[in-house]
Amino acid sequence: MSPVTSLPSSAGGFPARRPRRLRASAPLRRLVAETRLHPADLVLPVFVREGLDAPRDITSLPGVRQHSRGSLVALAREAVDAGVGGIMVFGVPAVRDATGSGIDDPDGILNVALADLAEAVGDRTVLMADLCLDEFTDHGHCGVLDDRGRVDNDATLERYASAALAQAAAGVHLLGTSGMMDGQVGVVRRTLDEAGRQDTGIVAYAAKYASAFYGPFREAVESTLTGDRTTYQQDPAGARESLLEVSLDVEEGADMVMVKPALPYLDVLRQVADASPVPVAAYQVSGEYAMVAAAAANGWIDRDRAVMESLLSIRRAGADVVLTYSALDVARALQG
Ligand code: PBG
């Protein structure tokens, strides 16, 4: 007999099973909670902008800022002190070009900021970097273009390999391969190994969808995209493809895989979590954060509760690690 039917559901006309009993007090609910949030599971994405002397607000991401090198280090120290598990760094260059030269320039904003962070907090946190060209190209695509304007997969892999070496040299612990080029994890892994960088890991954006929810990120990195990303990021209609992407990335050497965005793709996250032999991360992206912030600013939703509920949902769906712009706020709230 299954446990579900092992007891009568009513006795003498009253319910014999009363699930409300365990909901009756905060201590009871806390005791039986199946899923918990902990600061160590959270990763804070941060933006560092070349040429800034002071932080600058990002209108569509209230509470998130573009940082100067100095203010980024201060923010990272705060995050580490609050117990946040890791930091994902995005660089915003002052100048862009067709091949995204800034990404593998050791003096490029992302690489110098990573070196600052490695020096300041590198032994107390997990440093991650976005390994993607879109912040650095003038056309805004995640790769280089061929002579017909299409994103050239294999030419892009060469750029990623070079970027990987620059980021590893700057002291990053995990490289976030987020460009959705075929073979990117394998190329980056091989390049790192050949350079003696066996200790640098890869968090593969394995299942990454062509999503409207990246909207505010464009403002954050000042990127103007020509066209869209539908020829390399996944179609929102599909879930099965995510399992293929995950298995390829694991085969190619990913140390961790990611699903992105998070809340609109909890079904995908659950399937990936059930199938993945490596830890699974989920990215609560800019549009997810902005929706809650905008509704809360109108008084339509309780921001803190909505943030906690969405993060719990992402963990419940199977994420071991969650990237969220709320990481520092949540870590502080959890610390009490
Ligand atoms: C690629 C990248 C993007 C995001 C993270 N890495 C943009 C994109 O793929 O279009 C979006 C994150 C967010 O929206 O918060 N560099």
Image (spheres, rainbow, N blue to C red):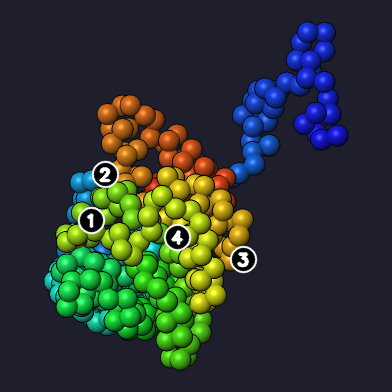
Which callout, 3 or 4, points at the residue further toward the start of the chain? 4
Q: Nearer the viewer, mark 1 or mark 4?
A: 4
Do labels 3 and 4 touch, CB within 8 Å? no
Left or right relative to 115: residue 333: right
Q: Which residue has dot 4 on it?
A: 207
Which residue is identified by label 1? 218
Is mark 4 in CB contact (under 8 Å) with mark 2?
A: no
First reached walking from the N terminus: tag 1 or tag 4: 4
Q: Earlier in the sequence, mark 1 or mark 2?
A: 2
From this viewpoint, is residue 44 visible?
no
> Amino acid under label 2?
Pro
Q: Position of residue 115 (x, y in %)?
A: 34, 76
Disc on res. 118: none
Q: Residues within 10 Å of mark 4 (few under 14, many from 20)?
A: many
Q: Which residue is mark 3?
A: 277
Please state the total of marks drawn on the protein image: 4
Q: Residues within 10 Å of mark 2 (few under 14, many from 20)?
A: few
Q: Is mark 1 within 8 Å of ligand 1?
A: yes
Q: Nearer the viewer, residue 115 or 182?
A: 182
- Residue at the image point whose x is 61% and y is 66% from the top: 277
Earlier sequence position, callout 4 versus callout 2:
2
Q: Earlier in the sequence, mark 3 or mark 1?
A: 1
- Label located before the other in sequence (2 or 3): 2
Distance from disc 3 to disc 4, alpha carbons, whole Å, reads 15 Å
Residue at position x 30%, y 78% in the image? 156
Give the Cα separation between the discs numbered 1 and 4: 20 Å
Q: Is residue 161 visible?
A: yes
Location of residue 22 in the rendering, given as x and y in whole percent from the top left corner: 69, 27
**Residue 25 position (above or below residue 322):** above
